[in-house]
Amino acid sequence: MVTNRKNKQRWAILFLLYLIVVLYITLFAWNYGASLGPEGPGGRNYNLVPLRSIYRISVFSPDIWDPIRILLGNVLLFIPFGFLLPMAVKKIHKLKTIVGLGCLFSLFIETNQFLFTYRVANVDDVILNTVGAWIGAVLYIVFAFFATRIHYIAPSDNKRKHYI
């Protein structure tokens, strides 16, 4: 796998941009319906009961699109975390480390949503985000496995082999 300094810097910049986008989406952008609960829209709420909101969203949504948007969206949001983190930081490549850091980042977001925004802090979001980080980490591991085993001939020099 190509691991030169320039590529690592590119991955690090891409990872940093990803983090900024995620923090903007989760802490600054208002998502319609993000704070529905006893206090109504715009109220500060939290859920510490695992799988409660996943169940409620799945069962009580008026159509299929809310569960897809909310539940799948939380998973998809963290897949890049699991893939980009080990690409950007050379020393982080173990599955449990990547997933653990994804979980901590999600917990950081949920805590800040409760403390500083009028959003719902939800343990189910942490669970779904962690699943997303796990999927991204598995994709990274598969990518790294195949990338170290694929040889190609560089267009500029047909005699020299390079590793992707």
Image (tube, grey):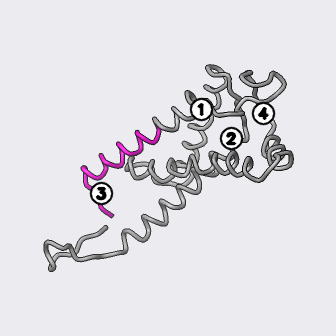
- The mark that comes first in sequence, 2 or 1, is 1
Q: Residue 3: which numbered mark, if any?
A: 3
Amino acid carrying mark 3 in the image = Thr
Asked if residue 14 lies in the magenta stretch, the reply is: yes
Q: Residue 48: which numbered mark, if any?
A: 4
Question: Residue placed at 55% from the left, 35% from the top?
Answer: 25
Q: Are marks 4 and 3 in contact (CB under 8 Å)?
A: no
Main secondary-structure element of the magenta-colored stretch: helix
**How many angstroms separate mark 2 from mark 4 (CA)?**
10 Å
**How many angstroms separate mark 3 from mark 1 (CA)?**
31 Å
Q: Are marks 2 and 1 in contact (CB under 8 Å)?
A: yes
What segment is highlighted magenta in the picture? 1-19
> Is 135 on the left or on the right of 72, as rendered?
left
Classify 10 Å Cα crowding around label 3: few (below 14), some (14-19), many (20 and above): few
> Is 62 on the left or on the right of 102, as rendered?
right
At which x and y percent is residue 129? 63, 45
Amino acid carrying mark 4 in the image = Leu
Amino acid carrying mark 2 in the image = Asp
- The mark that comes first in sequence, 2 or 3, is 3
Q: In the displayed image of the protein, which residue is found farthest to the bottom?
A: 159
At which x and y percent is residue 28? 55, 27
Asked if residue 75 lies in the magenta stretch, the reply is: no
Q: Give the structural element (helix, strand or loop) at label 4.
A: loop
Question: Residue placed at 79% from the left, 24% from the top?
Answer: 40
At which x and y percent is residue 115? 65, 20
